[in-house]
Amino acid sequence: MTPNPKTLDLLLKGGHLIDPAGNIDGPRDLGVRDGKIARVESDIPADDATHTVDVSGLYVTPGLLDIHVHAYFTRGQLDGNYGGSLNADAHFLKEGVTTCVDTGTAGSQEIDHFRESVIDKSTCRIFAYINISAPGMGDPEQTVVNLIPARAAEAALAHKDVVVGIKTAHFWTEQPFDDAHPPWASVDRAVEAGELCHMPVMVDFWPRPPERPYDDLILQHLRPGDIHTHVFARQFPIVDGGGVVFDHMFEARQRGIHFDVGHGAASFWFRNSVPALRQGFPPDSISTDLHMGNINGHVHSMLDTMSKYLAMGMPFQEVVYRSTATPAKAIGRPELGTLSTGAEADVAVLRKVEGSFAYRDCGWARIDGREQLECELTLREGKVVWDRHGLTCPDWERAGEFYFRSPDLQVVPVERLWRS
């Protein structure tokens, strides 16, 4: 009898699969074919796959989604506070992040260049928010004439396969407001652009009451589906003097405002995030705001930020949920962040290490935890793009014939060596 042909390219066998979007949390095998999730079953025979990887004792999750990063190398320079964007493939794939969103590094003047120089060449899937400032991030964000809703919306629609919204940030945080710098100019123009292109707005905001109070932002100026990032930064009235979460936070969530972590170098404080979590106000999505100016500081990686939430008491399944399914929904890509059959095979295989760990926030305060997340294996479109400990590799003594074959060497005349 002719044996059945292999039906799977790759089989992850023996792991604990967590797919919040598919409501799966338990032992499952996962099979990949042609870059897609082909089978998710309790016991898939190894004979069905060309290559089987034993992931016993590990967690298999959707590829992580970090919806606040900076990954565009501008033609000019980023503002000095940012230190420059980073290489997404170099920093994210090894952390299980298969999708990231650059949040407004490029404006309408730069999105074409961002697309051709970075997005289209990256293995990590990169989306973008277009800065309402046409020249992009940095000093141009302070000049109102640069904040052009029609141009931002036009650019967003021209690149709607990779653009997921509009970004406003950093506008007029210290100087007195005047006719040239109205308090809500950047926010309101970004929302206008969002209306024109039918996309959400992400807001990096500095409250300045009484002209520009925080509760007005989330209750009046933003729309359902719009995103406030850096939500647990110290400048926001999240909890009162007694540590009680303000009513306006729950009211805004009821309106449909999406609250994102956006950890960064200065925007994540346990004094806001821990009381909020304990009182039923977790972030809607976990993200890092990683760039070269902060990657060796308070924020290190997506997994480190997720581990902080484990230390704060968020259940692991919920940490995965807020790092996959909820950010996918926020950027209008619900087909991502899931391990459903037919979905693109973006997969993270994680190890949850138990021990004694300490994590710090942006105020140099610490929280102790007993768990830490590490990434063992990352698949992007079914291809292995990170394999920390060689899970997909054979022992060298049992490697195939190709391994032991020496390359054919062309004889090179000695005179060519010394002449070169």
Image: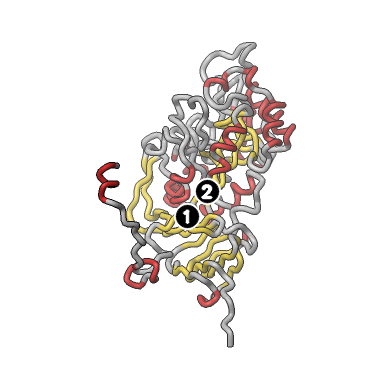
Q: Which mark is residue 385?
A: 1
**Can the viewer see residue 5?**
yes
Q: Are the residues flagged by discs 2 and 1 in contact, CB closer than 8 Å?
A: yes
Residue 88 at what x, y percent from top left? Answer: 49, 43
Name the quadrant of the N terminus.
bottom right
**In-image side of 164 versus 31 (left or right):** right
Amino acid type, mark 2: Thr
Residue at 42 percent across and 58 percent down: it is 387
Residue 215 at what x, y percent from top left? Answer: 62, 30
Residue 112 at what x, y percent from top left? Answer: 62, 33
Residue at 52 percent across and 67 percent down: it is 10
Specify the quadrant of the image occupied by residue 249.
top right
For residue 168, above or below residue 16: above
Q: Residues within 10 Å of mark 1 (few under 14, many from 20)?
A: some
Give the SS element for disc 1: strand
Specify the quadrant of the image occupied by residue 184.
top right
Considering every residue shown, the one lying at the far bottom of the view is 1
For residue 134, above or below residue 53: above
Amino acid type, mark 1: Val
Residue at 39 percent across and 57 percent down: it is 388
Specify the quadrant of the image occupied by residue 179.
top right
Name the residue beneath numbered marker 2: 123
Name the quadrant of the C terminus.
top left
Residue 173 at what x, y percent from top left? Answer: 53, 21
**In-image side of 344 versus 371 (left or right):** right
Q: CA distance from mark 2 to mark 1?
A: 9 Å
**Can the viewer see residue 251?**
no
**In-image side of 94 versus 43 (left or right):** left
Q: Nearer the viewer, residue 277 or 50?
A: 50
Give the SS element for disc 2: loop
Mark earlier in primary sequence (2, 1): 2
